[in-house]
Amino acid sequence: MDKSRRNFLGGSALALAGATLVSGRGKASEIPEAVIQESPAMQPPLYPKTGREYQPVVTLNGWTLPFRMKDGWKEFHLVAEPVVREMSPGMKAHLWGYNGQSPGPTIECVEGDKVRIFVTNKLPEHTTVHWHGVVLPSGMDGVGGLTQPHIKPGKTFVYEFVATKSGTHMYHPHADEMVQMAMGMMGFLVIHPADPNFQRVDRDFVFLMAGYDIDPGTYTPKVMTMLDFNLWAWNSRVFPGIDPFVCNYGDKVRIRIGNLTMTNHPIHKHGAPFTVTCTDGGWLPETARVPEVTADVAVGAMKALEFTADELGDWAIHCHKSHHTMNAMGHDVKTFIGVDKRTAQRAIRRLVPDYMPMGSAGMAEMGEMEMPMPDNTLPMMTGFGPFGPIEMGGMFTVVKVRKGIARDDYKDPPDYEHPPGTVAYEFKGKAPLAARQGPPPSAEKTRMEFDVVKPGSKRPAKHKH
Ligand SMILES: [Cu+2]
């Protein structure tokens, strides 16, 4: 449009005329019903009843937002609101989210779709929604103050764009971001390829990573925390509350992950390697796909991992930062490995009869013990498998590959039956004496490890490895 016409119409008239041309703003008059989800369980994939065909995704412990078609537009209704999210059985968090849950529902559309998303704000403060990685008009990008006025409490805004290219995206506020994301406001957005056979897989899982700081015995995240979070969540769930990735033997599987925490997460899968096939920027060319078993997902980034489920069994998948596979009790505990706490224990028990000294031989005992804890608090490490305590929390679950799993069956299957002779076993023979290399450490040297080093004195030389 040339300059003279712009002057003639004036700023606001121009904006209105432009919007009408592109979007048919006048037709966005009725708001579709907002669907609310009450269950934290993983919902089956939502096959489209209308619009174009696609292979839907499955949201880990989540769900997909239904849409309606209206005059060629695919219409969704998101409601930003306070929610109660069960993070694992026995622990609920008071979060902010969308349509009854945190994260919000997954939004699925198809390349070429005209997408209209109504966003109603039921929060106590203003918000916006940014569509992360989606190519759209600048004014639909959802940055409060920069590209649009904020959505005030009680108001509904409309976002409209054409989904120009397929890919892996997310949505989150761009308004009071630190607070709103620390409170759990986020959701997945998938644009499916126009050709349903392009990049097709049999199972397509999605989840977002979030970090929460919720003190034991409390419900609301501390929103000012910058680094020391105590609950590391996948779709606002922590182990053992995270569903397994159930796969039929031979399936082509994709797991799409987005990171909205304040640190990177090296996601490690046991068993068959995967390749990263997609980022929030688009699909990777075949020549850029290398086999890996760990993919570092950076802050604010997304990755899609793909593998063929051709190894039967139970394969752990988790963040490789070991503190991220622990729950809330794990942080301010001193290290007592090698410390004899018997004298202290006797003294403390005179005051606190139930006192249990922990950790002189490591922390594994925490995995099987039932300790008194505040209400609404998860054990630091927990979960039981067929062979005993799993001693995990946080960002951990299992890829379960079985034969005979039906196409859209995501139920937790029975325990894996290992073929005879394929499970690690205890050696029952006569143990030989250890063949030690180098001189044995003397008792004196071992004690020196715990000597207090006075300021100015020289630290005793330690055994070099
Ligand atoms: Cu991590």
Image (tube, rainbow, N blue to C red):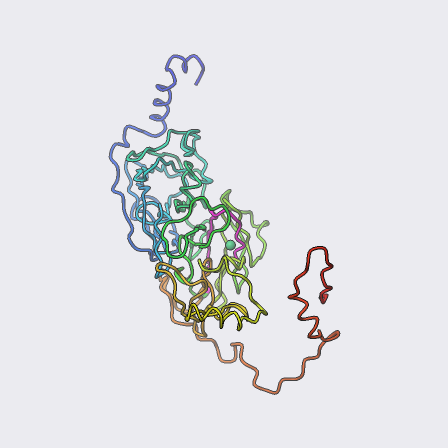
Residue at 52%, 69% (x, y): give it: 344
Q: Residue at x 42, y 29 (%)?
A: 145
Give the image location of residue 187, x and y in percent. 39, 46
Query: Most prominent secondary structure in the magenta stretch?
Result: strand
Q: Is residue 201 left or right of residue 36?
A: right
The quarter of the picture where the C terminus appears is bottom right
Where residue 158 appears, as percent x and y from the top left, is 33, 34
Q: Quadrant of the N terminus?
A: top left
- Any part of residue 390 in sight: no
Q: Is residue 403 above or below residue 457?
A: below
The residue under the point 55% across, 57% down is 294
Q: Can you say whether 24 is above or below 196 in the image? A: above
Judge left or right: residue 414 versus residue 272.
left
Can you see residue 144?
Answer: yes
**In magenta segment, residue 129:** no
- Where, by quadrant of the figure, is residue 159 drawn? top left
Q: Position of residue 249 (x, y in %)?
A: 45, 66
Instruction: Give the residue displayed 73% in from the left and 75% down from the top.
Output: 437
Q: Residue furthest bottom?
A: 430
What range is drawn magenta here?
A: 250-267
Q: How many marks?
A: 0
Compared with 1, 125 (above or below) is below
Q: Which one is nearer the viewer's eye here, 265 or 195?
A: 265
| The one of 293 and 181 positioned closer to us in this rendering | 181
Is 261 colored magenta in this rendering? Answer: yes
Q: Which residue is more in the foreground, 73 or 33?
A: 33
Q: Nearer the viewer, residue 23 or 176?
A: 176
In the rendered image, residue 63, in percent from the top left (x then y), is placed at: 34, 52
Q: Residue furthest right?
A: 438
